[in-house]
Amino acid sequence: RKSAPPAELVSSHESEALLAQVRSWLDDAKAENVAVIDIKGKSSIGDYMLVASGRSDRHVGAIAEQLQPAVLKLAHDFI
């Protein structure tokens, strides 16, 4: 199984495009309280961390189930 490329291999433009795509997916899944934390230069695993909540445990689980395959496919496209 391949993993996502290190953050330093993804350009700033690509990183912002990925952020916009993930935020769009979270919006489509009706995630609540979406917070974007800029971790550029503080972590080697990425430029941003997103934190979101849902209306219930079941809703949060559904968001994760929708987001995980989409993010993995997107990460695979960068490899």
Image (spheres, rainbow, N blue to C red):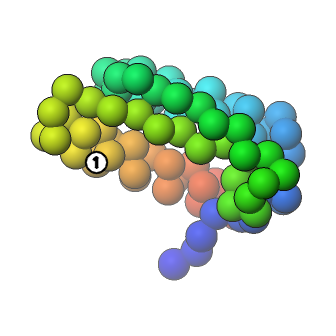
Question: Residue 46: x and y, percent?
Answer: 70, 53
The amino acid pointed to by label 1 is Glu
What residue is rendered at 52% in x and 29% in y?
A: 35
Q: In this picture, is 27 found above or below 51?
A: above
Quarter holding the C terminus is bottom right
Using the image, determine if residue 56 lies above or below residue 8.
above
Q: Furthest-bottom residue in view?
A: 1
Could you say where residue 68 lies in the image, as x and y percent from the top left?
Answer: 40, 51
Q: Which residue: 28% across, 48% down?
A: 65
x%, y% of residue 72? Answer: 50, 56
Query: Horizontal placement of 31 versus 11: left or right?
Result: left
Judge by depth and name the residue closer to the eye, 29 or 43: 43
- Observer-nearest of 46 and 77: 46
Residue 47 drawn above or below residue 26: below
Crowding near the residue tagged with mark 1, few <14, some 14–19, many ≥20 C-alpha atoms within 10 Å:
few
Residue 31 rendering spot, x and y as whole percentages: 34, 26
SS class of the residue under badge 1? helix
Which residue appears at 85% of the width and 58% of the height? Answer: 8
Q: Please give the residue where the numbered disc 1 appears in the rendered image.
A: 65
